Image (cartoon, rainbow, N blue to C red):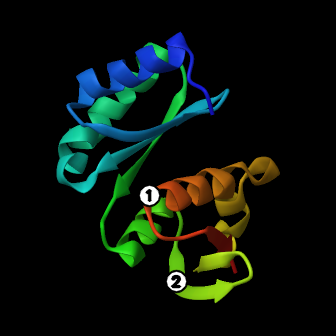
Amino acid sequence: MKLDGDDLRAMALFESITGARVIDFMPTEESFHFLIDADGAGKAIGKGAENLKRFRELTGRRVNVYVHYKDERKFVKALFRRFEVESIEFTEDENGRVAVVKVAPKDKARAIGRKGRNISIIAEMAKKHSELDSVRIA
């Protein structure tokens, strides 16, 4: 994915508002997805999510923040933080190392997202920032 000038300005704005160092950034038409280090997560979000609200007001787009942990299980769980995770299993198949995440039935459709967008973003971040090759929802 190639970032344009507007994307780079949005990333710089996020860093300036939150004080967080962005590890990865994925823009979509309606939202921004940021991966930040665990050390700065609380400060980045702000009391009552004030930093995220301010960013959303300035950009007019939703913002999703994901926290990176070195521990793979903790990282995968953090990628699914908006959903109730029932279990995470790691396995190997023809595609390599896979995290199979079981979410509560009430959250399954949202975790997948419209046209598979949410799971695609989660899987791409996991693949780029861990030893995983794929993430699937059970």
Neighbours of disc 1 within 10 Å: few (<14), some (14-19), many (20+): some
Q: Secondary structure at mark 2?
A: strand
Q: Is residue 78 left or right of residue 86?
A: left
* Residue sticking out furthest to the right: 115
**Alpha-carbon span between mark 2 and mark 1:** 17 Å
- In the rendered image, residue 103, in percent from the top left (x then y), is placed at 60, 76
- Whether residue 111 is visible, yes or no, is yes
Select label 2 or label 1 by which is in front.
Answer: 1
Q: For this view, does 46 lie left or right of residue 61?
A: left
The amino acid on which the numbered mark 2 sits, given as a three-letter code, is: Ile
The amino acid beneath tag 1 is His
The quadrant where residue 95 appears: bottom right
The one nearer the camera, 28 or 98, is 98
Q: Is residue 29 above or below residue 76?
A: above
Residue 100 occupies which quadrant of the picture? bottom right
Give the label on residue 15, or none.
none
Q: Is residue 103 visible?
A: no
Q: Is residue 82 left or right of residue 98?
A: left
Picture disc at residue 129: 1
Helix, strand or loop status at disc 1: helix
- Write down the quadrant of residue 96 in the picture: bottom right
Quarter of the picture holding the C terminus: bottom right
Q: Residue at x 45, y 19 (%)?
A: 8
* x then y, percent, for residue 54: 35, 23
* Number of marks drawn: 2
**Residue bearing mark 2:** 88
